[in-house]
Image: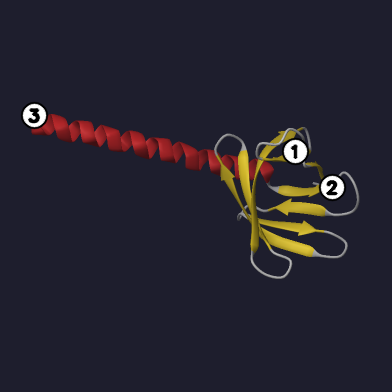
Amino acid sequence: MIIFMLLVLALIGVGIWAAGGFTYARSLIDTQRITGRYERPIGPGSIEFRRDGTVLEIAPLISNKGTFKMLPNERIEIEMEGMLWGTNRAVFGWGLVGSQLCLKPDGAETYLYRLKSLD
């Protein structure tokens, strides 16, 4: 009976590990898919997602840097340095359509950005 219980606990542990491993693997794949530099459709400026999880937003008057983290269900969390202090964090839905990266705020109906790849 004890061996059976240990076996059940081991299988539950393997199942939990496998689910976490799948999420981590998916996060790595999504990071590779989104990596690149994209221009804004209106006005000058670009945003660049790097493989190491950093993001750089370049605009004519100011550049901003931060980090991003891939989340489940085609979502991304972006944390950027504040203009004077602190950080700004937001979660977006994302998708790639051809060479365009589409970002939209969580729960919004319309896309906030529709960026075109420069690569």
Q: Amino acid at mark 1?
A: Cys
Counting every numbered tag in the picture gives: 3
What residue is pinned by disc 2? 40
What residue is pinned by disc 1? 102
Q: Secondary structure at mark 1?
A: strand
Q: Position of residue 117 (x, y in %)?
A: 80, 43
Question: Earlier along the polypeptide chain: callout 1 or callout 2?
Answer: 2
Q: What number is the disc on residue 1? A: 3
Q: Secondary structure at mark 3?
A: loop
Q: Quadrant of the N terminus?
A: top left
Verify CB contact (< 8 Å) between mark 3 and mark 1: no
Q: What number is the disc on residue 58? A: none
Verify CB contact (< 8 Å) between mark 2 and mark 3: no
- Residue at image point 86% right, 65% down: 61
Q: Secondary structure at mark 2?
A: loop
Q: Amino acid at mark 3?
A: Met
- Residue at image point 84% right, 59% down: 59
**Image-based side of 66 in relation to 5, left or right:** right
- Residue at image point 14% right, 29% down: 4
